[in-house]
Amino acid sequence: MAVRTGKRAQPIAGILERVVRALGHSTVYGGWLAVSQWSEIVGKEIAQVATAVRFSEGTLFVAVPDPSWRQELGFRREEILARIRRRPFGNAIKELRLVHAEKRIERK
């Protein structure tokens, strides 16, 4: 969807990002974009077991089901942060914190 401003149409997403930046909320907005785009960032395999659950003050909190996954993602921390930082909002994420969460129960 586009909004007509003056002579040419502009994508709404671009306008929203400029408004968020002008209000001084780009870091918070960027952090929550990382939460919402987690599966795209890390891929399906990791997203099935680890979930980005929240963002606060530069830290992206990721819930993992057990110590083995916590260790695995700990090894991949820099790789994951590099993937995040390649995105337009990536500079909002300063730290990745792995937290324990109960295992998901797959329902059919």
Image (tube, helix red, strand yellow):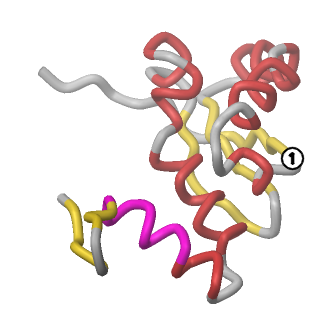
- Side (left or right) of 72 relative to 104: right
Foreground pick, 6 / 96: 6
Q: Residue at x 26, y 64 (%)?
A: 9
Lateral position of residue 71 relative to residue 105, left or right: right
| Residue shown at 46% from the left, 48% from the top | 36
Residue occupied by mark 1: 95
> Residue 38 at what x, y percent from top left?
52, 36
Q: Which residues are magenta?
A: 11-18
Q: Nearer the viewer, residue 31 or 15?
A: 15
Q: Residue furthest left?
A: 108
Dominant secondary-structure state across the stretch colored magenta: helix
| Vertical position of residue 20 compared to residue 44: above or below | below
Check the image and report above or below for 70 versus 37: above
As helix, strand or loop, the secondary structure at mark 1 comes to strand
The outermost residue toward the bottom is 23
Which residue is depicted at the point 71% across and 31% down?
Answer: 86
Locate the C terminus and report the quarter of the image it occupies: top left
Percent x, y for residue 14? 44, 62
- Give the quarter of the figure containing the N terminus: bottom left
Magenta stretch holds residue 37: no
Quarter of the view holding residue 46? top right
**Image location of residue 29, percent across then percent down:** 58, 67
The image position of residue 60, as x and y in percent, is 72, 50
